[in-house]
Image (cartoon, rainbow, N blue to C red):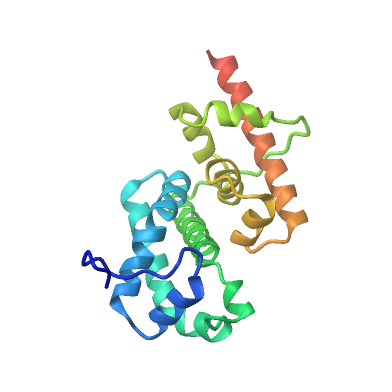
Amino acid sequence: MTASGEPSRPPVGDDAALAARLAARDPAALREAIARYAGPLHRIAFRMIGDPHEAEDIVQEACLRLWDHAPRLAARHPAGTPAGASLRLSGWLKRVATNLAIDRLRAARRLSGEDVPERADEAPLADARIETDERDAGTRALVLALPERQRAAIVLTYYEELSNADAAAAMDMNIKAFESLLHRARAGLRQAFAAQGDAR
């Protein structure tokens, strides 16, 4: 506890210490983890799902999974060791949230009977086009129309600004497979942008 009455926090980046506190079933540690990571997780989930309530459910489930997995994470990454220094709870949680969102999208698709095919187009899509239109509702709708794994690749790369390596890790993919997926996602968006322009 600090002099101001605020709960003491581990230094930024000291994820192993936070994992150890979670493993020891410290409720304050869970509150800290939620305060630290809920915002980015909600952004990922909302951009993939498009529903704020579903996104909130995904955040809660991801945080519960962190609570459940904390003993194993703490055992593999002891605080104060090189293994502990390598622990990135943010990356772990983003992977969990991404997978939960993909699972929900697939379940919804099975229930509705809809199937969104993978689309391929070899023409490049300018990255600047995505960045320029990031806040545009039409662009969000186009991203939401992509197949779920392509959608995840776009959200992690362009909205969360993860490197290809970090985005691949969040999706539990090797880098070459992720880059191929991202290429297909860009191609699908390019087609959608072109179709949107033709319809105007």
State whether residue 8 is above or below residue 146.
below
Tell me if I can see residue 160 in this picture: yes
Q: Position of residue 114 (x, y in %)?
A: 50, 46
In which quadrant is the N terminus drawn? bottom left
Instruction: Name the image quarter holding residue 173.
Output: bottom right
Direction left: furthest residue: 5
Q: What residue sits 55% from the left and 26% below the top?
A: 132
Provide residue 150's location: percent of width, then percent of height: 61, 46
Number of disc labels: 0
In which quadrant of the rendered view does residue 129 lie? top right
Residue at image position (59%, 60%) is 170
Residue extending farthest to the front is: 3
Tell whether 168 sits left or right of 76.
Answer: right
Does residue 100 sit above or below 140 in this rendering? below
- The location of residue 121, given as percent across then percent down, is 74, 34
Residue 58 visible in this rendered orientation of the protein = no
Side of 200 relative to 129 (left or right) = left
Q: Is residue 181 left or right of residue 130?
A: right
What residue is rendered at 63% in x and 22% in y?
194
Residue 82, placed above or below residue 33:
below
Q: State the residue in front, 196 or 113.
A: 196
Percent x, y of residue 67: 39, 76
- The residue at 45%/57% (across/down) is 104
